Amino acid sequence: MPLAIARRMDRRPVATGALLAIVAFVFFGVQLHRTRPFVDEWAYFAQSYYLDLFLDGPSDARQWLEYPAIDLPPLPKYLIGFALRAIQQERPGPAASWAWYQDTSRSFASEQVLNAARWPSVVLGAIGVFAIFLLGRQVGGVAVGLLAGLFLMLGPLYSLHARRAMADVPTEALVLCAAVAALAAWSRTIAGKGGALVWALFVSAGVFAGLAVEAKLSGALALIVIGVWTTLGCFLPGVTMLRRLMLFGGLLITSMIAFAVFVALNPTLTVHPKGPLPAEMRELEAKSIVGRALEVAAFRSGVSDQARQQFPHNALNDPLERVKVVIVQGLGRHGPFGPSENDSRVRYDWRQDGGALVWGPLVFLGYAFAFICGLKEQSKGVPPLGWALCLMGLTTFGVVAWFIPLAWDRYLLPIQASNAVLASLGLVWGLRSLRSRFAGAPS
């Protein structure tokens, strides 16, 4: 019976992934009422009026150059605004956003209304589980995809943020969607399968990557990973010059589409308010679109520097310390075997990080099998998806370890998805190897 079920799943992979996404949606949704309000949720909630400003407000509204517009990216605020519109809940006005900055302990509605604002994260959390299933299936088959989806869904970090009205899980889900589309386009290009489908996949990757950056600037990780895959494809032996040009063309199209989406949905980059403006707003208004985008990125970097000073017990100022946190906490308390609740005030703690003793070997085993799979795929003349997975994991780890400013859980969310796929690949291929060895052993 289990074998028959496995074969049926292999024949209907999309249906299997969709069922997993539905399970994730229910799993995240039923826990909403148990999730305590988090301080940053009210910041996004208080700025949900930006949806009304985007859809119905004047195109030159000066609010797009004010501090709240620059501080928090617009997409999560739009999503929360849509959720509040769905229940006919009036959105807070600009005064609420300023009130939150003056007193971050402020709340602006009942917990029931806040739960309604969390549903976009629930939906995108389920989409992220579906995306990682597709990613795992591309690399190692349905079993790998299913296991990776379960690891991500049941992991305490992803599950927690899938129930918060914030930017982190929406960003992660959109990054995964971009990765799925880009990896499919990459593998088809390496295999010499061109055509409209490949370019449609590159365009789709660009749309998802643009939305990811619109949700949080760390969504740029999607474009970084795609760039690394492009570089890998160009250095593979046997890849013709035409295919290399297609890869670079795909990367260019993906990047251009992503930037276009980012600009189209963020009037902060284009608005020109009429009338007198304060000096800092006038300085920003005078910049080009690229100049404003760089200014927003510099602003967010400055906010991280301020947070290091404000929370010195969580600050990560030393490169080695950042690497240690990403390894120990990323594989420990924030991995699938971590506790449901954690204390960030304790940097390293066996009670919280002991799960790394199980999860770490599984992830490293996944790297080993992914590399070996890549070697076999390359020797057979097919796209080395195992190497692509290795590079996705290493790139994600490197970017997070380079930029992480504080030992806070949400900064370690990006490594969880690639770790889940790697561990699933290691577990599935390890079990298959053991089964083959014992099956071939003389009785």
Image: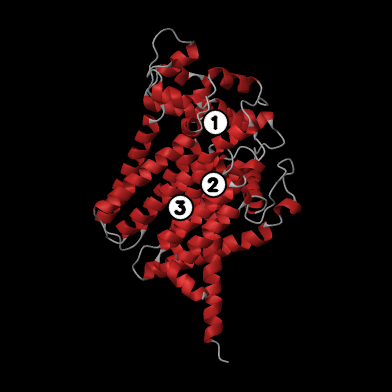
* Residue drawn at (64%, 32%) of the image: 39
Secondary element at image label 1: helix
Q: Amino acid at mark 3?
A: Ala
With 55 as the anchor, is 246 left or right in this view? Answer: left
Is residue 270 visible in the rendered image? The answer is: yes
Q: Which mark is residue 111?
A: none
Could you tell me residue 52's position as x and y percent?
A: 44, 24
Could you tell me residue 405's position as x and y percent?
A: 61, 37
* Residue labelled with disc 3: 131
Structural distance between the alpha carbons of marks 3 and 2: 14 Å
Could you tell me residue 349's position as x and y percent?
A: 75, 50
148 and 56: which is toward the camera: 56
Could you tell me residue 159's position as x and y percent?
A: 59, 48
Q: Amino acid at mark 2?
A: Pro
With 408 as the anchor, is 70 left or right in this view? Answer: left
Secondary element at image label 3: helix
Residues marked 1 and 3 touching at CB (< 8 Å): no
How many numbered callouts?
3
- Count residues near mark 3 (Cα–Cα under 10 Å), then give few for <14, some for 14-19, many for 20+: many
**N-term-proximal mark, 2 vs 1:** 1
* Residue drawn at (38%, 51%) of the image: 181
Of all residues shown, which one is farthest toward the top? 276
Residue 345 picture quarter: top right
Above/below status of 357 relative to 92: below
Closer mark to the observer between disc 2 and disc 1: 2
- Count residues near mark 2 (Cα–Cα under 10 Å), then give few for <14, some for 14-19, many for 20+: many
Above/below status of 22 relative to 291: below
* Residue labelled with disc 2: 414
Q: Which mark is residue 301?
A: 1
Structural distance between the alpha carbons of marks 2 and 1: 18 Å
With 369 as the anchor, is 210 left or right in this view? Answer: left
